[in-house]
Image (cartoon, rainbow, N blue to C red):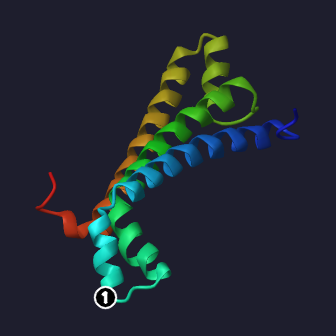
Amino acid sequence: MVVATSLFRGAVFIIALGSWFAVTVASMSGIQNVDKDYFDAARTLGASERQLVFQVAIPHAMPSILQGCTQAMSSSCVAIMIAEMMGVKAGLGWYMNWAKSWAAYDKMFAALFVICFIFTVVTKVLDLIKRRALRWQNGVVK
């Protein structure tokens, strides 16, 4: 079975698949955990099905959805490193593999530190987005 016609497209497919799975499972879990009383109260107040989804289910599931985004970011970083090390002919993973094959361990560890730095920056940005989106939780949830 051919999933992608090039190594780059294959890498993108693997990253997208890993990210999609984490976000989808977390979103489903978050929406399933919405208390049924919230839906009943909204229906009593005359909410339509669209309002039930966008004003009850999604806001209540937002912590789970954003947690899924965090997990997806982690799994996509791992997937991109594996894809670069295995098949793609560019990127930091490829550079680490190349440096290792030439026993240039200083370059290999420099690439590893750059990867860690990028991962840390992306994690902090996602945490900032999470804190902004979930402002109502500050002081309530630890």
Observer able to see residue 32:
yes
113 and 21: which is toward the camera: 21
The quadrant holding residue 43 is: bottom left
Observer able to see residue 94:
no
Amino acid tagged 1? Leu
Q: Is residue 52 left or right of residue 131?
A: right
Q: Is residue 7 left or right of residue 5?
A: left
The relative height of residue 5 versus residue 98 in the rendered view (above or below) is below
Position of residue 47 measured from the top left corner of the image (x, y, whole percent): 39, 85
Q: Which residue is mark 1?
A: 45
At mark 1, the secondary structure is loop
133 and 32: which is toward the camera: 32
Q: Residue furthest left?
A: 139
Residue occupying the point 44% across, 41% down: 119
Position of residue 105 measured from the top left corner of the image (x, y, whole percent): 53, 15
Residue occupying the point 75% across, 28% down: 87
Rendered-image quadrant of the N terminus: top right
